[in-house]
Amino acid sequence: MLFYDVELASPLMLGTAQYPSPAILAAAVQASGAEVVTVSLRREASGNLAGQAFWSIIGALGTRVLPNTAGCRTVKEAVTTAHMAREVFGTPWIKLEVIGEEDTLQPDVFGLVEAARILTEEGFQVFPYTTEDLVVAERLLAAGCRVLMPWGAPIGSGRGLNNVFGLKMLRAHFPDVPLVVDAGIGLPSHAAAAMELGFDAVLLNTAVAKAGDPVGMAKAFALAVEAGRLARHSIPMEPREMASPSTPVIGKAMLA
Ligand SMILES: CC(=O)[C@@H](O)[C@H](O)COP(=O)(O)O
């Protein structure tokens, strides 16, 4: 699947916040096989690893960077942060977050569409963090987005796929649009489930950064997304309402 004309072998994208140390971050990214990491300009610029030191660590990972506008609550903030990101990282990619509600960190989808339109007109390649709402998805595509990133569950909640039906509908309505489940993934099985539904990638941060062993968990996610993708390509069986014997009845064995 192409993400703005970039082919990625790994369907795992990893966040870079909240790791116990830069060394563990680097080892986790390597173990995950992720070719894309996301970086929050606002959060890192105000954190312990502010400024050049953090950007050097990210640069040394050797991955593609998807800067994000995490923490932005208005269109203006998000657009300004995107401009800064393009300058710092020299990439047109931007993961666009415009947060609209404090308890759930739910996207402000109205602001999101507006910011997406402004940024795509300025030449950005926007990865919008959105809900599974089909109408919003249409508006984002009309605004020029060529990738959609619906949430699995609220950021940092680790709840997995809260609305499987909604995600399935999104996949069915937009079969040709690259879709990435972003946020709320807590376990490798959640990531595998997203891939089994036909999503093209998953983006996660907290589940790896806050694991007891982030490097081990990164590897577990790498295996899970591959398993989910292979299962999808292998065409899973249809679930049935009734039992159906899977073992030959005694007396009719094939060896008889
Ligand atoms: C890192 C980042 O961009 C987050 O905003 C993202 O949505 C990940 O969420 P989780 O931490 O829930 O995986």
Image (spheres, rainbow, N blue to C red):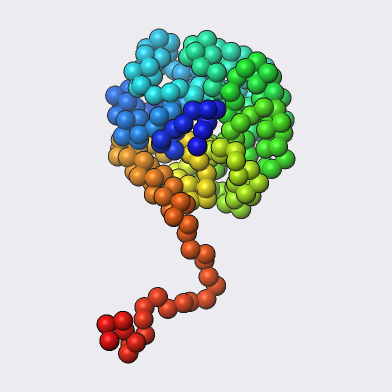
Q: Position of residue 1 (x, y in %)?
A: 50, 37
Q: Is residue 103 above or below residue 189?
A: above
Name the one closer to the observer, 228 or 21.
Answer: 228
At 52% from the left edge and 64% from the top edge, which residue is drawn? 238
* Residue farthest along the left direction in this orientation: 255
**Looking at the image, is 212 positioned above or below residue 241?**
above
Q: Is residue 137 visible?
A: yes
Quadrant of res 252: bottom left
Foreground residue among 256 and 49:
256
Q: Is residue 33 above or below residue 229?
A: above
Residue 23: quadrant of the picture: top left
Image side of residue 131 versus residue 24, left or right: right
Q: x, y percentage for residue 121?
A: 68, 18
Where's the C terminus, which quadrant?
Answer: bottom left
Rendered location of residue 104, percent (x, y) = 60, 38
* Residue drawn at point x = 55 percent, y = 18 percent: 92
Residue sticking out furthest to the bottom: 251
Closer to the camera in the image, 36 or 155: 36
**In the image: residue 140, left or right of residue 10:** right
Q: Which residue is painted at 61% across and 31% down in the image?
A: 146
For the image, the number of numbered tags is: 0
From the top left corner, tell me how far across and down residue 50 is, in percent.
42, 13
The answer to whether 104 appears left or right of 158 in the picture is right
Residue in the picture at 67% in, 27% down: 144
Which of 106 and 191 lies nearest the eye of the viewer?
A: 191
Residue 80 figure quarter: top right
